[in-house]
Image: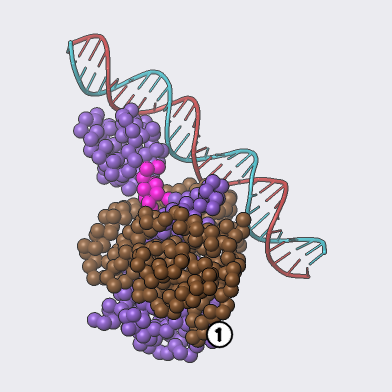
Chain colours: A brown, B purple, C red, D cyan
Amino acid sequence: MEDRAPASIKQFEERLIDVSESLPKRLRQCAEYVAANKDRIAVSTVAEMAEGAGVQPSAFMRFCRILGFSGFSEMQRLFRESYAGGWPDYSTRLKNLREKAEGSASALLGEFVDAGRASLENLLKTIDAKTLDDAVEALAKAQMIHIIGLRRSFPVASYISYAFEKMNVPAMLHSGVGGLDNHNAIRTGDVLLAVTFSPYSAETVDMVEAVSARGIPVVALTDTIVSPLRKFEAITLSVSEVDFGAFRSLSATLCLAIVLSVAVGTKRSE
Amino acid sequence: MEDRAPASIKQFEERLIDVSESLPKRLRQCAEYVAANKDRIAVSTVAEMAEGAGVQPSAFMRFCRILGFSGFSEMQRLFRESYAGGWPDYSTRLKNLREKAEGSASALLGEFVDAGRASLENLLKTIDAKTLDDAVEALAKAQMIHIIGLRRSFPVASYISYAFEKMNVPAMLHSGVGGLDNHNAIRTGDVLLAVTFSPYSAETVDMVEAVSARGIPVVALTDTIVSPLRKFEAITLSVSEVDFGAFRSLSATLCLAIVLSVAVGTKRSE
DNA sequence: GGAAAAATAGAATTTATAGTCTATTTCTGA
DNA sequence: TCAGAAATAGACTATAAATTCTATTTTTCC
């Protein structure tokens, strides 16, 4: 279709960027999938790539042509030839990184990736299915979901808020902008979803206290069981994030957050 | 021929050592070639492997059988799958989930934990150490770091902002509250850290464009290489998050974000 | 040194995969 | 709103690859 086929991965990438501006829907899906999974090309069939991209194999073929290849096979050949093998695998890679890249940003990355994985595993082990179901149940029944989470918990709260928005779940993020606290927006029939981690922000705890006193159900996302939210009759989901140094990446917390959001979204649309 | 097929590369290697003691000439050639070129198995045909080993394809087939596989294809599958950490086909898994475990939040959790772990591993594999170092370098030299990230990227931006704050790195989060865009706050000597994921928000792209035109360095955190930020001369870190259905947990992205923050914080305090 | 067993090479068969063609749908511009 | 063009889905065909089979050669053991 176009001029000549890319002769190297670099050229391939350039071409991909070039064309991806002006691509119709399905072909754009191909471009995005390929961009994110270049390593799969060498070891997959067209059918697999097409399925991954969510298109028909023939569409994927057209995509290969637009990139300048005669077909999928030619494109695959480029990747197979320059395929160096993805090993050593994750654990050896991590070890190497720790040993030689000490002090660099890459070494840090290794540590945080590891911490993240450990946190996720731990989440799966410690979460109580019953409590999770209860939380979903409570949130699904709410007329409106109020979300609060400040400081370190704010990213989590805003993410949940975004997810609810996308799924048409009525939700309101209490961000405390301008020092307005909007307690009065919370009405009977609503539910409060509070996110807080040590050091627990006073505003969040106060809000839970106030709201809880009015008999409004509260779902809490917090760390450990000694969190101050325990005092109130809240459905408490606790996540313990493995920390590295003084910092915690929020891998497990966000994972739980998205699960909660999707589960609630699905249940409400039933 | 023998008992069961190796289920991992490790088992495969053990088996290879086991049998290679007592092998006739041609099959020994196969064993030696395979041992020296394990990485080629995933991307070659039997004919190619046989030629490489200097034997007939049928001899190579017998070799595969002796190792415990039903044929070459099965052996190849092992290598293709373990490359890139066995690829979970999330679209079909999601469908299955919808069909059987409707409503079970725990099942959802399992899927998202898996997706998160895969994303983290992938991050470790695909991140370019040099680019990461460049990004840290650029940010560490900045007089002030401006952070922008809207919609889905907002949690990430706010998290980075929080981390910088904790480490006394001068940073400003451009949240677009009240529609004020504060472009003028960005001055020579500053650096812009832009976070954006598909669908790319126009505000972020515009800001990068404007700032970039003024010669101010930009560090971008985005997905894939087809992102619109590629056009500008930005130091681009791309993270591809394994998506599950229409949703992505931000595990890998947040991990990279914290790494960036900590690395910058550390470098500045040196 | 010869018979039996094992191993090998090469052709034949079967299966899987890429690539092609066409009817249908979806966009686009008048 | 309609006509034309472009894009897409799905069936169909050609091709390339894996696998099996058999005749031949090599090895092994008596």
Q: Is residue B59 above or below residue A39?
A: above
* Residues drawn in magenta: B77-87
Q: Nearer the viewer, residue A140 or B184?
A: A140
Q: Which residue is mark 1?
A: B178
Label 1: state its secondary structure: helix
The image quarter containing residue B59 is top left
Q: Is residue B183 above or below residue A21?
A: below
Instruction: Check the residue under mark 1 and report the chain it is in.
Output: B
Q: Nearer the viewer, residue B182 or A119?
A: A119
| Residue name at image x 42 percent, y 84 percent | B172
Q: Is residue B9 above or below residue A267?
A: above
The image quarter containing residue A112 is bottom left
Give x and y (percent) for residue A166.
57, 66
Give x and y (percent) for residue A213.
50, 73
| Residue name at image x 27 percent, y 79 percent | B267
Residue A111, magenta (yes or no): no
| Residue name at image x 54 percent, y 53 percent | B103
The image quarter containing residue A246 is bottom left
Q: Which image quadrant: the N terminus of chain A?
A: bottom right
The 10 Å Cα crowd at callout 1, few under 14, some 14 to 19, many 20 or more, is few
Which kind of residue does numbered mark 1 sit on?
Gly
Give x and y (percent) for residue A151.
41, 77
